[in-house]
């Protein structure tokens, strides 16, 4: 990038990512609202199916972490052709993995739920949307390549087009509008899968056209160079396991929390939905740190890489701290937007007020993790994730739910402690400065 001011670079990279996250939240809200007009079984089937699809997709799409780090390093070093070659090989691998993703559909629902109607609807939904994973994984990897090259606007454009298509497709196919048959759950699945295809097509168009800071070539796309992708895989596997650990921990703790009762579980779910809005600044500045750390290390400017990471952390902390203040000062008003059930709102407001204290630690952890990954240190964040989930989160929630049978607010206190420990460990890992000398072995 030609802009010299690091703060401007950070803002330019971060704001499209934040808007992109808002688009994904919007489409999830629209999906939930439209499916919510169907039967309870349909709601459960679509909710579980979508969570499974995105969990599977995101775990495999972690291949994009390695692609971002190596592409950013090459771009910073002025080796654009090498960046493009690694990018196209990562994309080829993503397409292959996406094809394998459809094999996961049939047995999942029969394992996690008992309701026969939910199993039938959920399996049908999941089978259709997992076809979309063939396109979702390359879409995520393609966006990672663009971000490594310093372009976060194209992924935003792709998200706007795909999610708009998804919302319109939901309305038309779920309810049978404009001459289309009323498909219900199947319509929601088709709309989601088709939207993944559209998003992938948009991202590939810009990557192949070469107007986005990097250009991938068709002739390299059809030939998988195992030697070239080895470095990408080595960097990405720890990130994939980190994603698996985090998602698995959340799923298991959610199942445990459900044992506290319907009202407590509903309050927890609503609080999670409200808090999801606060992740966006942290994720946006995390991406900025990943890109700028990688590019500056490639350009032999470790001091600029360090400044990029520190400023990104500061900006994320300020914004998420502001959200935390809102959560603490106005929890009832915020939770009232999500439900009209007074008992649930009152309990969720308590959870949200406690959750206010995890906003700044969460921002620090997200951005420090992004900075380490941009330098090529993906093992560090994975190890820290193991510690915070297996030593802090899961044991504490188990004790709260099954041993002491405490209030749901204590669960949120446990997550505050988890993010505080995670932020501290990420900071300690970062301050050791070993990330500045990581050799990605870019030469094949």
Image: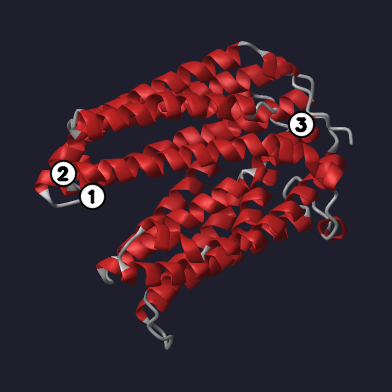
Q: Pick whichever of labels 1 and 2 is earlier in the sequence.
A: 1
Q: Which mark is residue 281?
A: none
User: Element under label 3?
Assistant: helix
Give residue 418's quadrant in the image.
Answer: top left
Q: Are marks 1 and 2 in contact (CB under 8 Å)?
A: yes
User: Element under label 2?
Assistant: helix
Q: For mark 2, does the 10 Å Cα neighbourhood hold few (<14), some (14 to 19), or many (20 or more) residues?
A: many
State left or right for residue 19 relative to residue 150: left
Q: Which mark is residue 338?
A: 1
Residue drawn at (39%, 72%) of the image: 120
- Residue 8 in view (yes/no): no
Residue 425 on image: x %, y %: 50, 17
7 or 200, nearer to the observer: 200
Q: Which residue is mark 3?
A: 73
Q: Is residue 390 above or below residue 14?
A: above
Q: Are marks 3 and 2 in contact (CB under 8 Å)?
A: no
Residue 347 on image: x %, y %: 16, 39
Residue 146 on image: x %, y %: 68, 45
Q: CA distance from mark 3 to mark 2?
A: 48 Å
State left or right for residue 323 relative to residue 222: left
- Residue 262 in view (yes/no): yes
Give residue 157's quadrant in the image.
Answer: bottom right
Q: CA distance from mark 1 to mark 2?
A: 8 Å
State left or right for residue 35 relative to residue 421: left
Q: Which residue is mark 2?
A: 345
Q: Pick whichever of labels 3 and 2 is earlier in the sequence.
A: 3
128 or 369, nearer to the observer: 128
Q: CA distance from mark 1 to mark 3?
A: 43 Å
Can you say which quadrant of the picture contains the C terminus?
top right
Q: For mark 3, does the 10 Å Cα neighbourhood hold few (<14), some (14 to 19), or many (20 or more) residues?
A: many
Q: Is residue 223 above or below residue 37?
A: above
Residue drawn at (50%, 50%) of the image: 55
């Amino acid at each position: 990038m030609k802009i010299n001011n690091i703060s401007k670079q950070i803002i330019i990279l971060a704001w499209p990512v934040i808007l992109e996250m808002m688009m994904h939240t919007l489409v999830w809200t629209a999906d939930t609202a439209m499916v919510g007009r169907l039967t309870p079984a349909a709601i459960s089937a679509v909710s579980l199916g979508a969570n499974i699809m995105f969990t599977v997709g995101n775990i495999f799409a972690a291949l994009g972490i390695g692609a971002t780090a190596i592409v950013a390093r090459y771009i910073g070093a002025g080796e654009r052709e090498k960046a493009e070659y690694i990018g196209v090989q990562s994309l080829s691998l993503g397409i292959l993995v996406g094809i394998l993703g459809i094999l996961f559909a049939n047995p999942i629902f029969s394992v996690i739920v008992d309701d026969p109607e939910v199993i039938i609807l959920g399996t049908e939904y999941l089978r259709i949307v997992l076809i979309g994973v063939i396109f979702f994984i390359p879409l995520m990897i393609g966006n990672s390549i663009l971000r490594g090259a310093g372009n976060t606007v194209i992924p935003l454009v792709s998200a706007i087009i795909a999610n708009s298509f998804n919302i319109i497709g939901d309305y038309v196919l779920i309810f049978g509008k404009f001459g289309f048959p009323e498909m219900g759950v199947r319509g929601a699945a088709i709309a989601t899968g088709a939207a993944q295809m559209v998003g992938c097509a948009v991202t590939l168009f810009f990557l192949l056209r070469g107007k986005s800071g990097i250009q991938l070539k068709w002739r390299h796309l059809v030939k998988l160079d195992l030697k070239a992708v080895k470095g990408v895989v080595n960097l990405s596997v720890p990130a994939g396991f980190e994603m698996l650990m985090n998602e698995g921990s959340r799923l298991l703790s959610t199942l445990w929390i459900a044992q506290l009762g319907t009202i407590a579980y509903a309050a927890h779910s609503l609080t999670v939905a409200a808090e999801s809005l606060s992740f966006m600044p942290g994720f946006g500045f995390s991406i900025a740190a990943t890109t700028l750390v990688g590019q500056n290390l490639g350009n032999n400017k470790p001091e600029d890489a360090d400044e990029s990471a520190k400023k990104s952390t500061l900006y994320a902390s300020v914004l998420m701290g502001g959200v935390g203040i809102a959560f603490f000062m106005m929890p009832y008003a915020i939770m009232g937007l999500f439900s009209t059930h007074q008992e649930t709102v009152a309990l969720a407001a308590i959870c949200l007020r406690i959750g206010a204290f995890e906003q700044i630690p969460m921002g620090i952890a997200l951005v420090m993790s992004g900075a380490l990954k941009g330098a090529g240190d993906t093992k560090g964040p994975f190890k820290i994730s193991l510690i915070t989930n297996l030593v802090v989160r899961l044991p504490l929630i188990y004790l709260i739910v099954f041993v002491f049978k405490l209030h749901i607010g204590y669960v949120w206190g446990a997550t505050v402690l988890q993010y505080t420990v995670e932020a501290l460990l990420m900071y300690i890992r970062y301050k050791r400065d070993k990330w500045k000398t990581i050799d990605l072995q870019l030469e094949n």
